[in-house]
Amino acid sequence: MTVQPHIAVIGAGAWGIALACTLSHIARITLWTRTPVPAGIRALPHLPQVTLPEAVTVTSDLPTEADIVVLVVPTQGLRDVTMALQKHLKPDVPVITCCKGMERGTFLLPLQIVEQTMPGRPAAVLSGPNFAIEVARGMPAAATLAAHDLPFVTALTERLTTPTLRLYASTDPLGVQIAGAAKNVIAIGAGISVGAGMGENARAAIITRALAETARLVDAMGGQGRTMYGLAGMGDLILTATGAGSRNYSLGVAMGKGENIQDILAQRDTVAEGVLTAPTLQELGQRFGIETPIINVITRLLSGELTPHQARDELLDRPTRFE
């Protein structure tokens, strides 16, 4: 009799619930939530329309045993959670980060945080163009799983691919993480252009040129710029910068229509990661000497330094150049 593996999913937000649902086809799942919940609960607040499969057990106790740990907490809370987990888990249990963005103050990406808080532990990053509700409902999807160690990430990809979520292996975790951070920022800019009535041409230009900016930054940081044209880059960016279900894009649309960013954020109980990531991404461009005009303009829009039409004029007035 084959014993099902045990996967611990840390974080019961929408994406954590979705991953718990799809991974339940191949494993026994423990889904950790920070807030205590009643025993046997089958639905959670962030995706109340989804009934959790029987293979999923919800708990507020951090796991002490698991074959694989999937980290689905906000990047800004990753350090505290992983420090607590390190005390509970055996050192050879692999962890997979599924959060996007960079830590404020340190400029660290999720895997870099894990390297500090869980030293020596095998780790990978999962990213791709996926809305949580569709994955939770078993609709077809794909994502990238990245780590430096090719045999490790290849084996992990085979192990975690589910009947409805197809995984592709990559050896460029840095590129995958930068792509995941940048797409939220770019999606805000795309939303602002649409909300301000600038049209579809403007949105397409923002998406395309910002993608090129980010590819140059990835190359400069030691990653593989071509990663930006795969699932974790172009795929995730297209979804996040065009889909009505995107938190970052919808925030941009509201800003483009003239709403104040603080008022928008106050009305939400979910995180638009691009707001926190934009100034850090801008700083990285400056640090590595890479021109990131679109990212810079989006950062200044978020700080209130520019209006949408001032941003438009600034970008259109830049000197011409070869693509």
Image: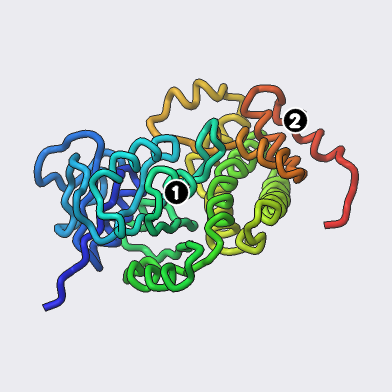
Q: Which amino acid does label 1 sit on?
A: Glu
Task: Out of 297 and 154, give the one closest to the viewer.
Answer: 154
State the SS at label 2: helix
The CA span between labels 1 and 2 is 42 Å
Is residue 16 in view from this perspective? yes
The part of the image, by quadrant, that contains residue 193 is: top right
Residue at the location (44% across, 65% down)?
142
Q: Residue 309 carries which label?
A: 2
Q: Hey, what amino acid is under mark 2?
A: His
Tell me the residue at 70%/22% (across/down). Answer: 305
In the rendered structure, which disc, 1 or 2, sits on the residue that comes first in sequence?
1
Q: How crowded is mark 1: few (under 14 residues within 10 Å), some or many (20 or more)?
A: some
Q: In this view, does 45 lie to the left or right of 232?
A: left
Q: Is residue 75 above or below residue 31?
A: above
Is residue 47 among what the camera can see?
Answer: no
- Where is residue 222 shown, x and y percent of the image? 65, 56
Q: Work out which quarter of the rendered image holds the N terminus and state it.
A: bottom left
Q: Is residue 8 left or right of residue 295?
A: left
In the picture, the disc for residue 115 is 1
